[in-house]
Amino acid sequence: MWTLSAFADEIAPDLDAQLETFAQESIRHLDLRGVWGKNVLALTDDELARIATALAERDVHVATVASPIGKIGIGDDFAPQLVAFRRALAVAQNLDAPTVRIFSFYVPPDDDPARHRDEVLRRLDRLVREAHGSGLTLLHENEKGIYGDTPERCHDLLASLGSPTLRAIWDPANFVQCGVRPFAAGYALLRPFLAAVHVKDARLATGEVVPAGAGDGDWRETIAALRSDGFDGVFSLEPHLALAGPSSGFSGPELFRTAAGAVKELLREQDIAWT
């Protein structure tokens, strides 16, 4: 049985509105990226306590702390990121979340990513060492424009660091927006590292984000292969159907329900149960 989660701030800024839509869609896991217009790492301890109480009342669990760590330029000062990263770890432990999302740093446009490989690896190694012993797993997302935005460079990072503390998110829409057909180009390469899937899709011709199965993200092939492989990770709805910004996305309640219906139908097609 697979776990269905979602980025609740895609629905609305207000936590109650987020959780009401979750209840309507029978979603009981949350990727915590933002609440009340604040990024997860800007939330105070009191606000985290309010969130924990509200989630417990609704029987909703935090699947991952969807931090923005690593979403800075590779030439930017790394020291503030370490401070923010330690906060991300603390938030995850506070909310009993098993994972923290990270990125592998933006490289300058039109620059050769290979020039920045060593520095990317140095920074990620530091994050992995910081997280070691915490009981948390770091999840690398293949965001467009960062070092790890293609299957080959994602594999390079994961294999080179070789740590069970660092696993991969499979975001097919982000791969499509890099001009990649995800399943053919990357599934076999990255499957050994996959711990989570971001549910959104995109069209190769335009980069437009669409519901899962409506674009070129190879959703049916991927779901079939994951099922065959015994995947037991998290599927996280991140629809971006109204807005896809550099630090967040937005869909609103109606488009969020459209996105949720699309992935549920894909799972039903292959008789996959979810919780």
Image (cartoon, rainbow, N blue to C red):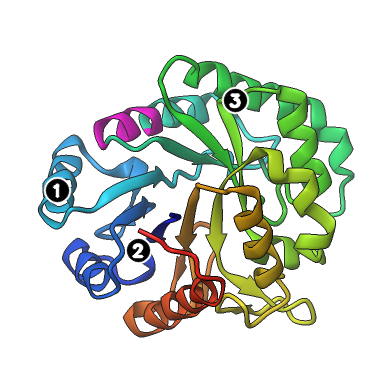
What x and y, as percent, mark residue 48?
A: 20, 42
Residue at numbered disc 3:
164
Frontmost of labels 2 and 3 is 3
Residue at the (70%, 47%) spot, across then down? 146
Q: Is residue 76 left or right of residue 263?
A: right
Residue 74 found in image quarter: top right
Q: Which residue is mark 2?
A: 9
Could you tell me if residue 160 is visible in this image? yes
Q: Residue at x 87, y 54 (%)?
A: 110
Q: Residue at x 89, y 44 (%)?
A: 112
Residue 46 in the magenta stretch? The answer is no
Numbered circle sitting on residue 56: 1
Q: Distance of mark 1 from mark 3, alpha carbons?
A: 30 Å
Q: Position of residue 232 (x, y in %)?
A: 51, 47
**Callout 2 crowding tier (Cα within 10 Å): few <14, some 14–19, many ≥20:** many
Rendered-image quadrant of the C terminus: bottom left
Q: Nearer the viewer, residue 52 or 212?
A: 212
Q: Amino acid at mark 1?
A: Ala
Q: x, y percentage for residue 89?
A: 39, 29
Residue 41 lies, with reference to residue 84, above or below; the image says: below
Q: Quadrant of residue 83?
A: top left
Relative height, residue 34 to residue 23 (above, below)? above
Contact between marks 1 and 3 (CB within 8 A): the answer is: no
Magenta-drawn segment: 88-95
Look at label 3 and name its amino acid.
Answer: Pro
Q: Nearer the viewer, residue 118 or 30?
A: 30
